[in-house]
Amino acid sequence: MQLELPTIDSPTEVAHRFSDIAYRGIQWDLSHLDPFAFRVDLGLGTDITVLVLYSCHCFSHSIQWDKRLRDAIPAHEVYFDGREHRILNPQRYELSRRFLPDMVSNLSNRRITIANEKMPNFVTIENVNADGTASLYAVFFEVKKDKSRRCRLVLRIQSAYLLDSGLTNRQAKGGKIAFETLLRSTYLGKRVRG
């Protein structure tokens, strides 16, 4: 895998560069979630570029998941990404800083499970210590062929968070797939099955 700076050429991709934000007066540097790209040889006669984009779900959670009443949530904790309002989550932010860049950069060496064949989306899990207890940090992602650029795939990190109650049945029984196989199948338009 050869890392490179991405060529950002659409408003959608530019929007994935998060501005620094403040949570309860503390600045959050989100530069670890900047887009990046790498090239990979999938045996197709040309290198394929993979553009990696992150969602705000890596440092925020749904309003519905918040235990507080909507009116009790301070305005400075609400994050709007242009599509949805979410709540800043210090645990997700800290875990994303500590683990996410390394996990994503090393997907070719990680165990990847098909989280949902219908979407399709995928998950890789890391055992971490959070609050003194062993926990599962799950990174959910999708890979799609770029419609606007030849020889490019877009890997979008959909979300990353601690699994409160461990793996779901579907995740535990989901099929495994090698990262390069996932990329090749996606590029060739083949359905990924578990």
Image (tube, helix red, strand yellow):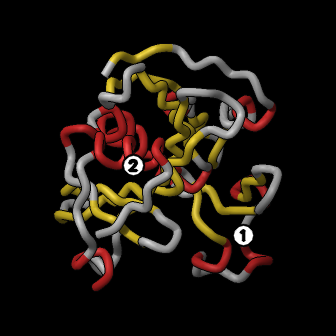
Q: Report the residue marked by disc 1.
A: 73
Give above or below for 145 relative to 168: above
Does residue 72 appear left or right of residue 55 in this picture?
Answer: right
Q: Amino acid at mark 1?
A: Ile
Does residue 96 appear left or right of residue 77 in this picture?
Answer: left
> Residue at (42%, 20%) from the top-left corner?
46
Label 2's element?
helix
Residue 185 disc label: 2
The image position of residue 170, as x and y in percent, is 32, 81
How crowded is the residue under tag 2: few (<14 C-alpha within 10 Å), some, or many (20+)?
some
Q: Amino acid at mark 2?
A: Ser
Residue sticking out furthest to the front: 45
> Residue at (23%, 49%) from the top-left corner?
178
> Residue at (28%, 85%) from the top-left corner?
169
Q: Of residues 23 and 9, which is closer to you in this image?
A: 9
Residue 60 disc label: none
Q: Of residues 68 and 55, which is closer to you in this image?
A: 55
Does residue 182 appear left or right of residue 159 in this picture?
Answer: left
Give above or below for 32 relative to 99: above
Number of marks: 2
Q: Of residues 192 and 20, which is closer to you in this image?
A: 192
The image position of residue 63, as x and y in percent, is 67, 73
The image position of residue 155, as x and y in percent, is 50, 42
Give above or below for 173 relative to 139: below
The image position of residue 194, as x and y in percent, is 29, 69
Give above or below for 36 relative to 113: above
Q: Nearer the viewer, mark 2 or mark 1?
A: 2
Specify the quadrant that holds the N terminus. Answer: top left
